[in-house]
Amino acid sequence: MSTEQEQVQVRFTTQQTQYAVSEAAMLLPSNIKKDGLSEIVNNLLDIDSPIPFDFLIDGQLLRTSIVEYLNANRLSTENLVTIEYVESMLPPTPLTAYQHDDWISSVKGHNGLFLTGSYDNNVRLWNSTGECIGTLMAHTDSVKSVAFGQVTDATATIFSAGLDHTLLGWEYSLEQGTDRLMYECKGHKGPIESIAVDSQNKFIASASADSFVKVWTTTEPTEDEPSETSETPKKRKKTEKTDGRKIKTKAITLEGHVGGVNSVTFDKLDSNVVYTGGWDHSIRSWDVEQQVNLTTKNCEKVVLDVDYSSNAKLLATGHSDNTIRLWDPRSEDGSNVKMSLRGHTAWVSSVCWSKSSEYALCSGSYDSTVRVWDIRSREPLYTVEAEDKEKKEKVLSVYWDNDKILSGGEEKQLKIYSAKA
């Protein structure tokens, strides 16, 4: 009997109760794929406007026909197949692009505000209408990372760091449209590659090419903190400070990486835990208070970026072998990659989980694409290509901001896409 004539017994189930149908078994052609299954579920629901659905067998997204899936997994077409269906995530659609003068190294979003760091040494704050409402100028070299601290109706706390070895804390008045440089965190002896603020906005962590990770409080000091390294702090400050900035030197230092640290992120549920990745091919978790390296996970390639999902309880890491790896930070095993996601054709420079889904994440790569993933499938759900595919302008940073994905890189544009997970 040919594959086309075979039938398979299936039953549909869903956790989205508004779309529930009868779970009674039915016979379907075994070569049916996602679109055909979606049509059947829509017919069973009897609704006016069809809804696109995705389908899972044993927790894996169906990307082939049912019979191809069963054969690949050595399962019989004679058994009853339970298929779970979920509403599909729509493809990212371009909303707008904000032009910059130079490469964009870092992008962040917060309730209609967008933050960018650039190789022109500047930090920019944008509103949702595309207006640059603030340009923060104090860095003396390229900005590599930006982050929002506490944001109220009146003010936004902003952090930035870069190749000038400094981490700066800013207060921006949303009412007045003015910025104030609150302080400079001083202590790193190399470029700062990545910064992250904890979920309580009490701490900021910085990862540097000097192999150290430092954790600072976000509170503004009332006066300069004495330098631990300089014998003549007054003289040094007098020559270096030209804009009245206060100097913070007190920080917890996390030591253990061998070589530069490329990325740092806080555990969203525990501000005492940070995760880092670097050139030494390791992903590390740290107890900040105790200054202890809790676990070290090793892989074959450089770690370029790290992000933690409080929904999935997983770390996603981007690597120089074009691969995204998922890890369970609670596991004691030093090399337990839970899953590898492949599809990029160059270094994966940036990864960011959706805030609303335990399955969705986005990635940016030197291959000039942004990709959206559902970790129930090893292939990307969607790939957003650059406008000029020939140029291969690197994507350096992505950020999933609620129902939007932000990206920036060598194209010199902050690109914003609609993307609801």
Image (cartoon, rainbow, N blue to C red):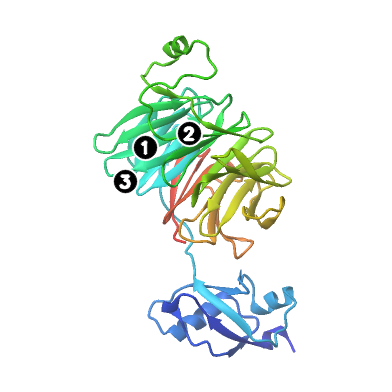
Precedes in sequence: disc 2 or disc 3: 3
Question: Residue at point 55% right, 59% down?
Answer: 312
Left/right placement of residue 402 relative to residue 255 reads left
Q: Which residue is mark 1?
A: 157
Measure the alpha-carbon separation of dots 2 and 3: 34 Å
Measure the alpha-carbon separation of dots 1 and 2: 15 Å
Left/right placement of residue 129 relative to residue 144 reads left
Precedes in sequence: disc 1 or disc 2: 1
**Percent from the top left, x then y, of residue 20?**
46, 81
Q: Which residue is mark 3?
A: 129
Q: Mark 1 or mark 2, which is nearer to you?
A: 2
The amino acid pointed to by label 1 is Thr
Q: Secondary structure at mark 2?
A: strand
Image quarter in which the N terminus is found = bottom right
Q: Residues within 10 Å of mark 2 (few under 14, many from 20)?
A: some
Measure the alpha-carbon separation of dots 3 and 1: 21 Å
Q: Is residue 102 above or below residue 366?
A: above
Q: Viewer-proximal residue, 220 or 406?
A: 220
Q: Secondary structure at mark 1?
A: strand
**Percent from the top left, x then y, of residue 244?**
36, 19
Left/right placement of residue 235 relative to residue 327 reads left
Q: Are marks 2 and 3 in contact (CB under 8 Å)?
A: no
Q: Secondary structure at mark 3?
A: loop
Q: Mark 2 or mark 3, which is nearer to you?
A: 2
Precedes in sequence: disc 3 or disc 1: 3
Mark drawn on residue 216 = 2
The amino acid pointed to by label 3 is Thr
Q: Are marks 1 and 2 in contact (CB under 8 Å)?
A: no
Question: Residue at point 66% right, 55% down?
Answer: 331
The amino acid pointed to by label 2 is Trp
